[in-house]
Image: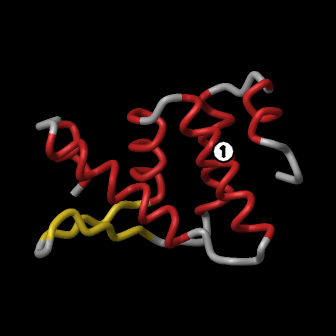
Amino acid sequence: MSKTSSEDLKKIPLSENQIRGILHSFMHSFESIEVQTSKDRHRELTIEQAIDLLVRNMSRESILDFIQQLNIIRERRSSVLAYVKYILTALVARLEQSGKRDINRYH
């Protein structure tokens, strides 16, 4: 993605598959992503699992903002991994606290 503002991105009618493709383009270089959900609890997610969690549990607007942040990070020639882990850690912790059982299929 080149310089597309967050507002411009929100105007583009992207399908779920297109959003998944964009997320995959940012994360394809990672074998897996390990998130820490508590002091002694970790989860290792494949890229497909991570993308599925993001798409299923974030609003469209939040995902587009997330993509915009990833784009900014990449433009600075920095790694997006820390930011992806930060968002996934918060998401997994929120799902575990709310008692959602579908998170258990991701270990």
Q: In this view, does 83 lie above or below 104?
A: below
Q: Is residue 6 above or below residue 37?
A: above
Q: Which residue is identified by label 1?
A: 21
Relative side of 99 to 36, left or right: left
Q: Is residue 71 above or below residue 44?
A: above
The image shows residue 46 at horizontal and vertical percentages of 40, 60
Q: What residue type is labelled 1?
A: Gly
Relative side of 8 to 51, left or right: right
Query: Label 1 neighbourhood size at 10 Å, few (<14), some (14-19), many (20+)?
Result: some
Residue 96 vs residue 65, the one in the foreground: 65
Relative side of 103 to 66, left or right: left
Q: In this view, does 73 lie above or below 69?
A: below
Q: How is the image coloured?
A: secondary structure
Quadrant of the snapshot with the C terminus:
bottom left
The image shows residue 66 at horizontal and vertical percentages of 59, 48
The image shows residue 17 at horizontal and vertical percentages of 62, 33
> Looking at the image, which residue sits at the far right?
3
Residue at 83 percent across and 33 percent down: it is 8
Residue at 68 percent across and 56 percent down: it is 25
The image shows residue 45 at horizontal and vertical percentages of 35, 61
Residue at 70 percent across and 49 percent down: it is 68
